[in-house]
Amino acid sequence: MELLLTLAGLLMALYAIIPRERQMELRFRVGPFEWGALLIVFLPVFFFLEYYGFFVARGWAPASEEWPMGFTPANVRPLLVLFLAVFFGLRVHRARLSRRRIGKFTELCQELLWAESYPELLSLFQRNVKEFFRIYRADYWLPALRRRLVSRVQPSFFLEDLIRVMEGPPARGLVDRIPEWLARPLIRCLPTYSSERNAAAQVVQSVLMTPRFMEAASRARPYLGIDIVRGLPGRFDQTEFMSGLLAELMANPASVLYWEIEKNRNISRGHRYDIPESNRLIHFLLKDARVAQDLGMWKPMGEFALRELDRLAADSAGDPNNQGAGDFQKRAMWRSPLYATVRLFDIMVREALYQGIEWHMWLYYFPPLVERMVRNCEPCGPLVDLEETFPVRYNHLIYEAVSAIRDWVKAADDIPEGQGNVTLRSVQADPGNGNIPKSSVLALGQCSRHVLVSEKFEEKFKDWVMNGTFELYFTLRQSAKLSRYADVLGSSLRHGGLAPWTADPMYLTSLHGSFGRLRHEHGITHQSEHVSDLARAIGVRTEGAAR
């Protein structure tokens, strides 16, 4: 008995000094089965061994001579205590979430969040993520059977209800043969597990959807976010969580997202990036571009970059993008939130193009991004060389953004002509939201206008940007498959983006000036008829046209 009392006292002392969240986790892990084993098996056996002589004297137990050789009540008791410790240790370590424990789990998650014990919270949730979402969705046979029956007698037109019905019980054919007069009383008898689902819903709303949890997950366990998005049944919750997680990842240049962007540079075929499975986040979002489309991946990226540019505008002297470019393209750009936005959009739009997504994926974020970069550009510092074509980082970022747009248009050459998202219905500079190359051309016209009308850039930088755009026109004109896109590009450049916006004289003067310099000073060497076509498209009167 002294051994039992000593052990109990030691355990109580340990329990008293450990943090409250640890106490709650123990209560969550130790359930009825463990307490039953302690009270029904261990304590009676220990009591029997402790008072073995009493039971032998009454004839209620065999004599000690009948025990196996070497075993006595005295040496079996420590073995029993050791067995109990091992049993409880394994049970506590391997304990998993169940419907009975969801209340304690909810309380524990909230307590860990309030105590800012993020490592313990993330570890706890990751160990139980599958079981948690099974409870949250009531993904059990009996509730699924009930939903199936309810859909027959009370049809619902809500999409989420239809999805839950289609998940249905396995014996769907048998369920469909149940008559309605029997289905109604069955519905009243079958469980919904609504209380368990409500407890799980508290975790979703008060823990998972909080900025603190998203920030902690983005730093310590970013891939847990993939499991959470997959587990959430509603599209709204999925979009809200992924938007918050991506925003936190974008805000931290040391996050795994920046590492994946840097490692995702290989172009495997044509103009398409290779997305390895080791880049788990990008692979999850873009291996099937419909996932990125459904989750609105563009919004957290674009909105974060716009907020970042507005924040930097408040202190142009402290803006690192106004410092000398240095080795920006070799090292620093991989930790730049603005470059990360450009590169993520680049991967996303290309995948949407190749996978046949008939939506522009909000590539129209690029014109306001370029506009704000132009606004913020205020070269300063002793290392800035204004004689360089790219004196500061903003010059690199603007050029990278414009180059990405041009690459989306060129990539259309790899797409079958009948694919819906490259089918060109109009060569005018009017919206074509289902056509990615046309949307890219229109965005390119807007970006060109923002660059050309700015007085902050030297002519050589403007010409460097526009040279690639003029070259794109010639590339399109020479392609049998894409030649009509050249007409769209010409119209987009003339209007400075979408028609019927009227380009201001300053923009047209700068556009014509850049074209003239590139043609006469730098030598555009393409066929003369293509040069003349471009000149007419952007409103330049050539000598041939004058005659």
Image (tube, helix red, strand yellow):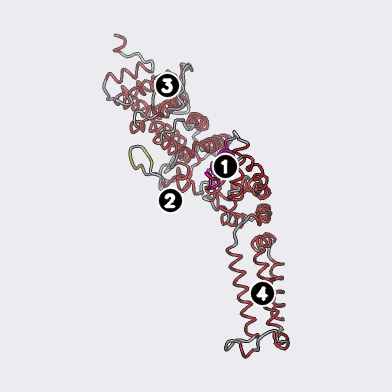
**Residue 335 against residue 352 in the figure, above or below:** below
- Three-letter amino acid code of the residue under disc 1: Arg
Q: Earlier in the sequence, mark 1 or mark 2?
A: 1
- Is 428 placed left or right of 153 in the picture? left
**Residue 346 against residue 208 in the figure, above or below:** above
Residue 129 belongs to magenta span: no
Q: Which residue is mark 1?
A: 164
* Mark 1 burial class by Cα count in 10 Å: few <14, some 14-19, many 20+: some
Q: Which residue is mark 4?
A: 42
Residue 523 in view (yes/no): no
Tally of numbered tags: 4
* Mark 2 burial class by Cα count in 10 Å: few <14, some 14-19, many 20+: few
- Three-letter amino acid code of the residue under disc 2: Ser
Q: Which residue is mark 2?
A: 278
Name the one closer to the observer, 346 or 228.
Answer: 228
Find numbered disc 1 in the image and state the secondary structure of the residue it sits on: helix
Q: Which residue is mark 3?
A: 492
